Amino acid sequence: MAYVAVKGGEKAIANAHAWLAEERRGDTAVSELGTDQIAQQLTIAVDRVMGEGSCYDRDLAALAIKQARGDLIEAAFLLRAYRTTLPRFAHSAPIDTAAMRVRRRVSATYKDLPGGQVLGPTFDYTHRLLDFALAAGTAPPPAPQAEADGAPMPLVADILGHEGLLQRETRSDETPRDLTREPLQFPAERDLRLQALARGDEGFLLALGYSTQRGYGSNHPFVGEVRMGEVAVEITPPELGFPIDIGDITVTECDMVNQFAGSKTAPPQFTRGYGLVFGHAERKAMAMSLVDRAMRAQELGEDVTAPAQNVEFVLYHCDNVEATGFVEHLKLPHYVDFQSELETIRRMRADAMAARETAEAGE
Amino acid sequence: MTEGYNFAYLDEQTKRMIRRALLKAVAVPGHQVPFGSREMPLPYGWGTGGIQVTASVLGPDDTLKVIDQGADDTTNAVSIRAFFARVAGVATTARTAEATVIQTRHRIPETPLTEGQIIVYQVPQPEPLYKLEPSRAATRRLHALSEYGLMHVKLYEDIARFGHISIAYDYPVMVNGRYLMAPSPIPAFDNPKMHMMPALQLFGAGREKRIYAVPPYTAVRSLDFEDHPFRTTRAPHCCELCGSDTSYLDEVVIDDRGGRIFVCSDTDYCAERRSTQQAAA
């Protein structure tokens, strides 16, 4: 009998951490990746981590990506765990995306519109051929430059709004709820829903948004507009009493315009699904706007039949830090529970076999 | 203690919010109180609810014990104990009798707890009805109405199909004759220990953002029927190490030919018994 109670968890953990650090570094003959390189060259990954980590800080997000060995959910988790310890100085005023310094703006509903269409730095029309010159480290030719014409770029939503064709959103100066401070409760209003979606997992929202396009909660969506660029963040310090600009952030905004046949209380008009995400995150912003619109089904008197329309389902399952924790916790020890299941199954099997024997003896 | 962090990691405002939830939970035994669960530096599912509750009740003079599966030396118990040793600098112990606060996952110690002790359970799923009704908006209503027919029907169906209630762990209990409560995934074997326990029992579910409690000396009844009374099961063996025939046992596979032994899941209980036996010999 060679059994000794397992000891040494502490040492095993320390050793695992050391091994992890070594694996993270990889071959030391290859130069180490700098967080500045991540921040500059893996920008979309950094944007995703800032969005899902709910913390706009490129350097911290880059560090999190490096520490997480490129696991973006793990990186978002690292950033969130840091964020939660930070003091809160102020709430910003709502950002004005109509005043965005636009780097990209496309509308699928109008061929041309004030401010024009701006393709910007997009993968959209690249041919997906592996670029071996990139592997060789060839510097790209400089991109052509031109003066911006400075023409205003009004939001498509406002253009449609003028005609009364787009449902007017209710304005409120109430402080929005904050699900990082208060527990999620239902019914969850749109401020809370949008906050949850903005922090939600890109993959989950993508799949749910896609499901609405395939008939699970049909939306009839058009991209009124997707825009990406820099907006100013303003706060009003109480000692000053007037707003001051504390810096710019990059955001991607999507206004999805959806057909709506009207109801008892509202005339036929377009309704809006809205997406707003930190950084350049077009896929996420578009998926978010589809899911936001789907979750408005009840409010608009539509049948709630599809997963994307079920507010509780979406909000409870869109958070990848929560989801990954609970899925992965299954690898923690469960021997006590398993033992109780073993005994229960053995007892049930004994009963079933005894019953069968009795039946056979009776034949 | 780690520089730059408050005592026991959480800031005082957060502790205050959690203590308020705890007070409400103690005042309404078995009722799930929503709270503003924070993101912790450990993953959801690893005991973030229990850790937040422990952090909020812990004082500098406390002695902390952390167990997972009954054992002090399982990796996650080691990790959580190390976390509190680091951020609170409190004394830690493996001895149940010496601890003032015990954080646990999946077990209640075999040594009976006493007045003045607090046991903090890590809870993965605070809603006892979730397998029967997944909507938390709906289950909240069922609790408000004390409408627990769903669970009784589930237990009845088990008996009709299998002759037994098939729930082996996280076996539902009625607290103080009012609220149906998930005891966390402790084996049903441990359920009777919750009844009229002299210690304060606190439950934290971080991911689900719920806290609940059973105050000392509160009735905790495992659901059953008159003709199918609640029964506990344990492996019908003795502990290979200390010989206990009453403790809850882990089954340990020792070879690939079906060989197995049984040992106490509560490592402190087992070690105490062995040292007493050695002293007597």
Image (cartoon, coloured by chain):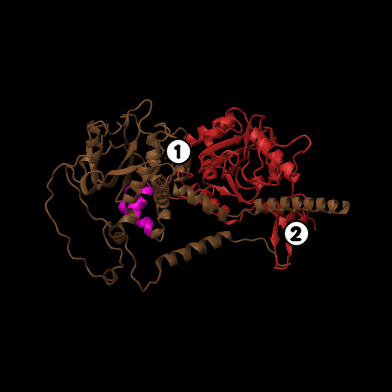
Shown in red, the chain is B
Which of these two is toward me, A270 or B205? A270
**Residue A262, horizontal then vertical, whole percent:** 35, 31
Which of these two is toward me, A35 or A301? A301
Q: Chain of mark 2?
A: B
Mark 2 or mark 1, whichever is nearer to me: 1
Residue B168 falls left or right of residue A112: right
Shown in brown, the chain is A
**Residue B110, horizontal then vertical, whole percent:** 70, 47
What span is colored magenta in the figure?
A47-65
Which of these two is toward me, A252 or A91? A252
Residue B92 falls left or right of residue B241: left
Q: Chain of mark 1?
A: A
Magenta stretch encompasses residue A53: yes
- The answer to whether residue A30 shows anywhere in this view is yes
Above or below residue A101? Residue A131 is below
- Mark 2–mark 1 CB contact (< 8 Å): no
Circle 1 is placed at which residue position? A311
| Residues at marks 2 and 1, CA–CA distance in whole angstroms | 52 Å
Magenta stretch encompasses residue A19: no
Circle 2 is placed at which residue position? B240
Residue B175 falls left or right of residue A251: right
